[in-house]
Image (cartoon, helix red, strand yellow):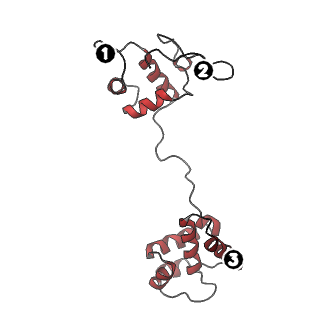
Amino acid sequence: MGSQKKRPVVLTAADREELVRVTTTGIHPASVIRRARVLLALDTSAGAIGSQDAVAARAGVSGETLRLVAKRFAETGGDVHATIARKKRELPPVPSPVTGEVEARLIAMACSQPPQGYTRWSLRLLEKHVALVEDIPNLDHSTIGRVLKNETASSSEEVLDHPTEGKRAVRGPDGRRTGHLCPAL
């Protein structure tokens, strides 16, 4: 009964009715229904709720799930919808190392002449050469392939101040491509 003493869940009649509707309609994701069932099982407004093991068995979840839902209910200030809904991620977990300048440098490298002994750039060869350049972060061949495949890639001339060898990507006023980026790709 530790979490029920620390963070009691007290629901209003409207909240209780909404949670019953969520659990019985079957149109919500399973995780939302499970958290709604946990809130209904932890509701102390109707009286004593029993031990944590009994509540967990009745709701069909673990004791840790009970504790986490009660904690989230307390953190959201008793907001039922914020408790049962999925948390929104504010930022991606890791920022992308590919910026506009890195993208332009990759395109410029792919459009340049390949090293001696090679007839064209491969993704693995680009990966090796990117690792040798100090101001470009190390990227694997799959990331390089996604950057080069990207249809909305800006031409390297827009970010770098010099034109690339070979054909250049030319975009019309409507943003559509009218030429090729480089002949090798």
Numbered disc in front, either 1 or 3: 1
Dot 1 or dot 3, earlier in sequence:
3
- Name above or below for residue 68 compared with residue 130: below
Mark 3: secondary structure:
helix
Q: Whole-percent x and y of residue 9?
A: 59, 78
Residue, far right: 14
- Give me the disc on residue 177: 2
- Pick whichever, 180 or 160, lies toward us: 180
Q: Amino acid at mark 1?
A: Tyr
Q: Amino acid at mark 3?
A: Glu
Real-space Cα separation, disc 2 to disc 1, in angstroms: 29 Å
The answer to whether mark 1 and mark 3 are in CB contact below 8 A is no
Q: Whole-percent x and y of residue 60?
A: 48, 77
Q: Is residue 79 something that shows in the picture?
A: no
- Name above or below for residue 99 compared with residue 51: above
- Pick whichever, 33 or 138, lies toward us: 33
Mark 1: secondary structure:
loop
Alpha-carbon neighbours of circle 3 within 10 Å: few (<14), some, or many (≥20)? few
Dot 2 or dot 1, earlier in sequence:
1
Alpha-carbon neighbours of circle 1 within 10 Å: few (<14), some, or many (≥20)? few
Picture quadrant where residue 26 is located: bottom right
Q: Whole-percent x and y of residue 20?
A: 64, 76
Q: Amino acid at mark 2?
A: Arg
Dot 3 or dot 2, earlier in sequence:
3
Mark 2: secondary structure:
loop
